[in-house]
Image (spheres, grey):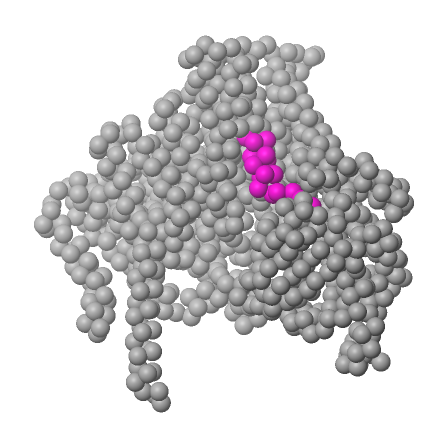
Amino acid sequence: MKFMENFRKGIPLLILVLLVICPFVFSSPYLLHIFILIFIWSYVTTVWSYMGRFGIISLGHGAFFGIGVYTTAILFNLYNISPWLGMLAGGLAAAAIAVVLGYSCFKFGVIGHYFAIATLVLAEIITLVIIALRDTLETGGKLGLTVRSLGTSPLFFQFENQLIFYYITLALLGLALLIWKKIDDSKVQRALKAVGEDEEAALSLGIDVVKYKTTMFAISAFMTALGGTAYIQFTMFADPTTCTGVGLSLGIVFKAIIGGMFTLWGPTIGSALIVVLEEYTRLALGSAFVSYSQIIYGLLIIILIRFLPGGLHGTLSDLFRQKREREVQVLLSGRQLADPHE
Amino acid sequence: MLRVEGLCSGYGGFEVLQNISLEMGAGETVAVLGPNGAGKSTLLKVISGLLKPASGKIYFEGRRIDGKPSHEIVEMGISLVPEGGRLFPELTVYNNLLVGAYNKRTRRHFKESLEEVFSLFPIIKERQNQIAGLMSGGERQMVAIARALMSRPRLLMLDEPSSGLAPKIVASIFEFVKKIKERGYSVLMVEQTVKKAVGLADHVYLLESGRMVFSGDQTSFLNNPKIKSSYLGI
Amino acid sequence: MLILNAVINGLLFGGVLALMAFGMNLMFGVVQIVHLAYGQFIMVGLYLVYLLTVLYHVPLLLSCALATIAIALLSVLCYYSVVKPLLKAPPINQLLALAGLWIVLENACLAFFGATYKGVQVVLPVLHVGEVYIAASNLIGFGVGLITLGLLYLFLNKTYTGVAIRAVAQDAEVSGIMGINSRTIYLITFVVGGALAGITAACFVPVYAVHPHFGSAFTLLAFIIVILGGMGNLIGGFIGAFIIGVVTSVSSTLLNPEIGQIIALLICLLIIILRPQGLLGVRART
């Protein structure tokens, strides 16, 4: 048992080591590209699930991602400010919006699907703002913008070598997972779980629900915006449909649902599946058929919500857990029989 | 007419009713009494199909009805007046009565039912175009009883018809119940106001924390020494 | 004069918007579901009219009627496949499943019709009364909208089924003990809601050439109106539609259209937070 336990704990480390050495084994630029996309979306989805796992479903994370993307790009393109600073600026802007919206929502009891709707409206507002600033801040409106290229310039977060992005985005994902773990072990987790079950009870226990929720929302928004910066520095091109808005928000949520939003690895698994599915249909059918992958993906969502609300990974690990719990129970009852005085 | 056998039911694992049995004949008026939280309302909810029983059987006119959806149970001839009346607040009184006669069995008798209800409660005829939500508590309770009668029930169930009403209005509500009883309806009533309810009942049951603790007629109820001290304050 | 023009055309357009919002509102009021894919139904309706008229040369009015029936059927399909299995699920799951439907419908249209604008050429005159110019398309939409809403009013107040729909919206549990099978009422509501989406699409035919992204724009527009009037509040939605009609019309005349929309959405956000019962609503829904 002990060995199994250690083995289970060792799996993430093993995966990490494999991923770190992976690029040396397969140096295909295309594969690297796919991996980077998987890392970025896994990162964003994991960060989204910080809230999602407690039943605070945001449909506005597309907005935070877009804020990261566009703040970085505009500050650099127009004012020559390094994207490293842009990253911070975007993160803070996203966090500020999250604090204002989150605090007012949680304060006035806008929860559940009403919160989802409020954040969805935010996503649409940010998209429209970006489009409306097509000339003022050269966002390019619906046509999108291109980041000025400097070749390789570490100070300006530009690298021609994809490998660097591979490690940066992998590190981001690692960080997101680590923070997920930290939250899971913390007091905040217990508080928010209590909130998920009974808001009034939590209040009577003296847990400042509004504060915890708002903080979590702000952290999640901040980190989502960082993902946006990484994305734009990698692709060097942004447009409102792919980088912000309701569509992107839904994309994030769906990745989490497919993988399972309540577990550590669920969001990563969901993102990997979706990115691969999208790439596969693009390669197999041509880019004109990307919409087919989206149709499959939408249907998958409906089916999953209907039959497996815990998501793929969530449901599978629930099954395993139940099995383990049964084993533990057998073990305990066995011991009780052997030594009733213990 | 109605027979409940060994009924158990509850919400989310918490058992509210434990092994309840009850029987009533046609034309009888039965009162189920008991303190708050004894499970009286739950009993009516289970009979009317709003709640599924965990175990036990319910027969109505020889047919088993437990577990059937509420809209089918109305069709069979059982009608419930929920606690507080629960009229549709934004509909007019007339439309509330219309909904009362919704089921297939009674819809074609709507006009006759309406006449009967109007003859029982002449005030309703005057108020038929009023929005239900704007009426007083007593009026609402009256319309709620009228609405239940629109489904031409053979068994009328009343869930605490007196709750939240001023004593004077309570008296008039019980006057209505008496009138209904005299018209030959079977009435199953759940109440906290013991004296008035017992006065109308042919048979009395006492429910305490989910268990039936007494069953008997009016006189044996009123003469039971334990009940005397704890419920009648004598 | 420009503003007066915008106000009048906005008011007229409000008639169609009222129709559009009514469908979403009805579904929220009765089934307690936020129909996130409602705008996509309207979009599919527009594509169907295009398909029938332009590609199969069916007369315009007939194809509008056929599209309306088809959307009502699509709505029934949506009820059985997405909504009914999730009636007892948490609202957020219903919302997300309908968002899934949104993605499916949008991309299905993208796959079949491509990303270009598809429209039916309907030449309608622009009428002018004095110095006010009125688009005949708006006038038709206004007429159709008001007539449909009038019929709906009669349906909901004078027929057994209509009154039962309202009863379920007000108290589903008590409706059950009145002999109403709420599942049947939900189905009828989806038929009516779907038909309304179809009629709205028909009214939009002379106004818009359709694009797959229009669905989400329609959903959001309906959404803003419904929230403005109070979710489930049919009269509030009716008034809200005219307000939004005028606001968008005037703001897109004076400012650029995005700013008008942003203002509308910000108001919408404020209402969700501060007055969830709607600006014009009197009762709170939980």
Q: Position of residue B108 (x, y in %)?
A: 74, 34
On the picture, is C11 further left or further right than A123?
A: right
Q: Relative to C116, does residue A310 appear above or below in the rendering? A: below
Magenta-drawn stretch contains C18 = no
Residues A249 and A255: in front is A255
Magenta: main secondary structure equals helix
> Which residue appears at 46% of the width and 26% of the height?
C44
A130 or C232: nearer the eye?
A: C232
Q: Position of residue B131 (x, y in %)?
A: 79, 43
Asked where in the image residue A301 lies, by quadrant, the reply is top left
* Residue ID at (85%, 42%): B116
**The magenta stretch spans which residues?**
C178-194
Residue C183 lies within the magenta run: yes
Give percent across and percent down for residue B77: 71, 48
Give the residue at x 45% y 39%: C81
Is residue A106 rendered to the left or right of residue C213? right
User: Relative to the observer, which residue lies in front, A229 or C37?
Assistant: C37
- Kindly identify the residue that appears in the image at 79 percent across and 78 percent down: B224
List the single residue furthest toward the bottom: A341
